[in-house]
Image (tube, rainbow, N blue to C red):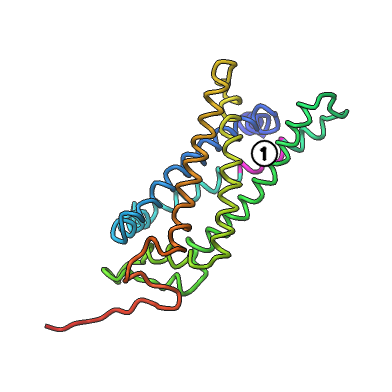
Amino acid sequence: MNALCKTLCGFWHSSIGKKLIVAVTGIMLVGFLIAHMGGNLLIFQGRESLNDYAYFLHHFLHGWGIWLFRVGLIVAFILHIVATISLTMQNRAARTEKYAHEATSKASLSSRYMVWSGLTVIAFVIFHILHFTIRIDPDLAAMKDPMDPSRHDAYGMVIAGFQNPIVVLFYIISISFLCSHLSHGIASIFQTLGLRTKKTRDPIQKLGLTVSIVLWLGFLSIPFLAIFDVIGDDETPTKADPVKVEVTSH
């Protein structure tokens, strides 16, 4: 084993190394969520804006751009999960006696809640990828843009995908868990990086809460308005009503 491998292994096995990995990957994931929400909100500008955005993402760098981004995101996501679970197990193993103070006990309950909310988020991410990225539903996968049948109708797919109340309910629960997770996680990032002090503690907590609320409102506004037919138009296809392309002659 060379010196670099020894250094990396030592970094990974140390609690400080794992905490830094959790913090850095956490920053990456929060940044992704903010960017992803911004892209999703283009749905309020109409079919053309959202479909243009989706087309750009899937054709950036001749289609390689989105795959490079996905691989990087998956690696960050896996590292974040594995490092968090490993830290939790180390903390439990190092605990030799029961907590003497109620405040410490509450912190422990909060940590356990973070783990369960994280597991819920994992289940949601898997479902979300299958639903909107891999598109295992053939009706959603077959949707074509009525204005340009050569490209996929991301706008119609999103609206049709949220016509199922069970999907919307699961989405609401998962996003709520995710944002609750973030409200604690963002503050932990600052603490790990040594940026959380007595003076900055309250502003950092408010920042975490604000970011979580904005993401919660932004992500949930789409399924909520879609299921009540507030967004969409006459050309928006549904799973039971696939797009039909009419050809006219002059």
Q: Measured from the top left, where is residue 134 in percent x and y?
A: 50, 64
Q: Measured from the top left, where is residue 155 in percent x and y?
A: 37, 62
Query: From what the image shows, is residue 77 above or below residue 193?
Result: below
**Which residue occupies 44% across, 49% down?**
68
- 31 left or right, relative to 14: left
* Magenta segment: 79-87
Query: From what the image shows, is residue 75 above or below residue 27?
Result: below
Residue 85 falls inside the magenta stretch: yes
Residue that mark 1 sits on: 84
Using the rendered view, name the quadrant where residue 141 is placed. Answer: bottom left
Number of callouts: 1
The residue nearer to you, when weighing 65 against 96, is 96
Q: Amino acid at mark 1?
A: Thr
* Magenta stretch, main secondary structure class: helix
Name the element at disc 1: helix
Using the rendered view, name the quadrant where residue 53 is placed. Answer: bottom left
Query: From what the image shows, is residue 101 above or below residue 70?
Result: above
